[in-house]
């Protein structure tokens, strides 16, 4: 046996033992169920969003202009790389993509989707297009099991892999937020292990991929700082990461991704949609107000406690989606930090189940696009004959009343969960502080 073989054998044995233990562990049924559910749905469901982003990827790969789409350039570049790998597996697919489907203001046209749905290898294409999202869900599931005690891993994995919101967003809708979530959860794991600078780099990367994690950045810096100097270093690292991406994209394309996001995307406007007229032409913007109050509360009470990051991150996402307009597929951001904060409390898990139900009822306002049309690869033109959900509801109750009640309940449940999560953390922190005081006195 050569030295190279001798060195390789322990590594191979280690890998095989890890795979064997994973298959035979108590988590195996959950892993298998989560994967099978996704494999069952991935090839037979579609939304125009995934077609849009891969149309951009086709244009980037075929023309060589890999940085032509400056908005959300990190996530688009990742799709460009993946598309370059899978394109050889999609024979005769050149004609199924649209040069304008990814353009803001034009978007996916009916003829574009019809051409894509008529592709003979559609199931294969959808499976390959969604495969990174499946991988991201599994990475997040693995990270979540590392953030809880072994006795709770089965429950936390179930709350993630079998969560209807997660399955819908990643496997049915085909939304790339799962990739950014995996990066952000890795950031959390590394930070809690003491590798806070690696964590801040990953948080910056996740924020560059999707802007939602950017709201966590100040809380991250205050939670994981050890000294005032380190606070400045962490905040500087986040700002520096943003500047590197900003200047790199400007140098490559001549366009600013930050200004493109602000000027071309409605997501920023959603943050200020809910407001109160306070007289004299002044407005109180509800989400910025709530976010600022939450941050001030956190700075006052957390005082650099690392265990405060997960509950406050859950509260940030709950407040964000409680006080802003959003599309249902973005609600996946509520899930990971929330389940890490409620997995030991059955009553809070019931509230999360109510959230899921209310989100499903709220999604009906988008009509066929988020109901029957998602299954068009499986049902074909039959989806056009199915009744619209809001038409059915409208025959019993005013659509405005229905949506108002559902949205009100969703916001109420979300804010109540945020309050309970923070209260529970404060209670546990106070108990631990009291125990430490008694130990010191003894």
Image (cartoon, rainbow, N blue to C red):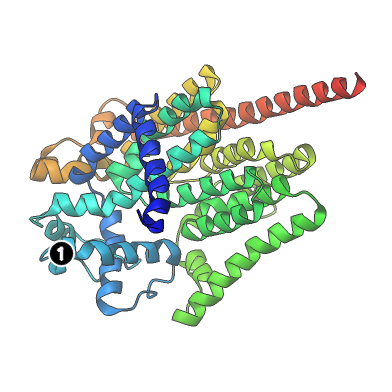
Q: Nearer the viewer, residue 248 or 8?
A: 8
Q: Position of residue 430 (x, y in %)?
A: 77, 25
Q: Nearer the viewer, residue 10 or 105?
A: 10
Q: Position of residue 384 (x, y in %)?
A: 13, 43
Above or below, comparing residue 104 to residue 287 in the picture: below
Name the residue tied to disc 1.
96
Q: Residue at x 55, y 35 (%)?
A: 147
Q: Residue at x 41, y 57 (%)?
A: 3
Q: Is residue 213 visible?
A: yes
Q: Nearer the viewer, residue 2 or 377?
A: 2
From the image, which quarter does the C terminus lie in?
top right
Q: Position of residue 141 (x, y in %)?
A: 43, 38
- Label 1 crowd (10 A; few <14 / some 14-19 / many >=20): some
Q: Is residue 276 visible?
A: no
The reply, left or right, for residue 100 in relation to residue 4 is: left
Q: Nearer the viewer, residue 259 or 170?
A: 170
């Amino acid at each position: 046996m050569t030295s190279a073989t001798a060195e390789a054998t322990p590594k191979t044995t280690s890998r095989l033992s890890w795979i064997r233990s994973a298959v035979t562990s108590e988590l195996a049924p959950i892993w298998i169920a989560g994967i099978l559910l996704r494999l069952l749905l991935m090839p037979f469901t579609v939304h125009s969003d995934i077609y849009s982003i891969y149309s951009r990827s086709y244009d980037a790969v075929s023309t060589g202009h890999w940085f032509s789409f400056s908005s959300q350039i990190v996530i688009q570049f990742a799709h460009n790389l993946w598309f370059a790998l899978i394109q050889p597996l999609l024979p005769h697919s050149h004609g199924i993509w649209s040069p304008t489907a990814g353009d803001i203001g034009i978007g996916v046209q009916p003829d574009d989707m019809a051409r894509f749905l008529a592709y003979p290898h559609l199931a294969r294409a959808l499976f390959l297009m969604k495969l990174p999202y499946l991988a991201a869900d599994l990475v997040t599931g693995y990270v979540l099991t590392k953030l809880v005690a072994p006795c709770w891993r089965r429950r936390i994995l179930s709350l993630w892999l079998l969560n209807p919101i997660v399955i819908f967003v990643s496997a049915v809708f085909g939304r790339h937020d799962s990739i950014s979530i995996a990066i952000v959860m890795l950031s959390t794991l590394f930070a809690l292990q003491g590798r806070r600078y690696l964590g801040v780099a990953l948080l910056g990367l996740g924020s560059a991929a999707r802007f939602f994690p950017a709201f966590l950045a100040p809380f991250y810096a205050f939670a994981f700082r050890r000294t005032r100097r380190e606070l400045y270093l962490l905040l500087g690292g986040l700002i520096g990461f943003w500047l590197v991406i900003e200047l790199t994209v400007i140098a490559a394309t001549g366009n600013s991704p930050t200004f493109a996001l602000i000027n071309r995307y409605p997501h920023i406007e959603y943050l200020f949609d809910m407001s109160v007229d306070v007289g004299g032409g002044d407005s109180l913007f509800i989400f910025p107000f709530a976010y600022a109050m939450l941050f001030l509360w956190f700075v006052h009470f957390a005082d650099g406690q690392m265990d405060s990051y997960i509950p406050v991150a859950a509260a940030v996402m709950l407040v964000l989606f409680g006080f802003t307009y959003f599309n249902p597929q973005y609600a996946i951001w509520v899930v990971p930090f929330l389940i890490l904060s409620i997995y030991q409390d059955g009553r809070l898990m019931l509230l999360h189940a109510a959230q899921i139900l209310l989100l499903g009822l709220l999604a009906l306002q988008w009509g066929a696009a988020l109901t029957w049309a998602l299954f068009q690869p499986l049902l074909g033109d039959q989806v056009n004959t199915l009744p619209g959900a809001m038409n059915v509801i409208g025959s019993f109750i005013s659509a405005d009343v229905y949506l108002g009640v559902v949205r009100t309940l969703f916001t109420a449940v979300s804010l109540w969960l945020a309050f309970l999560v923070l209260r529970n953390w404060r209670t546990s922190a106070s108990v631990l502080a009291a125990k430490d005081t008694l130990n010191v006195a003894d």
